[in-house]
Every structure is written in structure tokens, then in C-alpha cells.
Image (tube, rainbow, N blue to C red):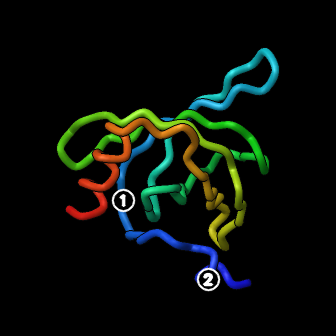
Amino acid sequence: MSDQDRRQRKRVEMNLLACFRVRDGKETATGFARTRNLSATGVMIESSDSFELEQFVTLDFLMNDNRVLKLRGSVTHLTRTDDGLNLVGIIFENLSTEAKRLLAQQIEA
């Protein structure tokens, strides 16, 4: 099955600033990334930091209306670009009704 067949939600190219936190055991890694695309169920971020498949990530997005949207998810896809950056696919988990509404607003903007 192709990626296109698996995607059931509208995916929009979007350049938002995101702060991430990853907790591995007792250590917490933090950093910044930018979004490449966003959907109601997940995001692709671009980062110089390394991630692992199935790793849990907390993301704070600076939305176009200057609101900060905090979401949690897990890493489902990893790709390294020719210029050494990491493309990280993250599926959102346990989205609140408000988070779903704000995501939909951002995607339709």
C-alpha cells in the first residue's frame, strides 16, 4: 500500500515553528524544529536532532494566530535528507476536542 493510500486526511505543506521534548528514561531531550506538512492526525517535522521510531514526543506549535498548541504523538517515519536534516513523521495521540478544532483551523487557513 502506498503512502498516498494510507493517508486519509488532508495534508498541507506548512512552515510552523515547533519546540519538542522527548523523554528517554531519566533524560529529557529538547529542541526546535519546523513543520514540513500538517494534517488532522499527524505532522512531518524537519530537525537536525535524531529521533527513534515509536519514540513519544511532546510538541508545542506556534500557530499562525500566535497561539501555542501543545500535542503529543509518536514517531512513525524517519528519513534523512541529502543536506543532513531529519524528516520525522509523528502521529498525534489523544487529541482533545479543542486541539482538533485548532488543527482544523490551521489547516484550512
Q: Is residue 62 left or right of residue 91?
A: left
Outermost residue toward the top?
Answer: 26
| Percent position of residue 78, x then y | 72, 60
Question: Residue at the location (68% across, 22% down)?
Answer: 28
Kindly check if marks 2 and 1 are in contact, taking CB atoms under 8 A apart as contact.
no
Question: Residue at the location (47% across, 40% down)?
Answer: 95
Q: How many marks?
A: 2
Question: Residue at the location (24% across, 54% down)?
Answer: 105
Q: Is residue 20 left or right of residue 96?
A: right
Categorize mark 1 by other alpha carbons within 10 Å: few (<14), some (14-19), many (20+).
Answer: some
Outermost residue toward the front?
Answer: 97
**Relative to the observer, which residue lies in front, 8 or 29?**
8
For label 1, the SS is loop
**In the rendering, which numbered label is found on residue 15?**
1
| Percent position of residue 24, x then y | 78, 27
The kind of residue on which mark 1 rests is Asn
Name the quadrant containing residue 108. bottom left
**Relative to the observer, which residue lies in front, 73 or 21?**
73
Outermost residue toward the right?
Answer: 25
Q: Earlier in the sequence, mark 2 or mark 1?
A: 2
The kind of residue on which mark 2 rests is Asp
Question: Residue at the location (24% across, 36% down)?
Answer: 67
Q: CA distance from mark 2 to mark 1?
A: 24 Å
| Percent position of residue 89, x then y | 62, 58
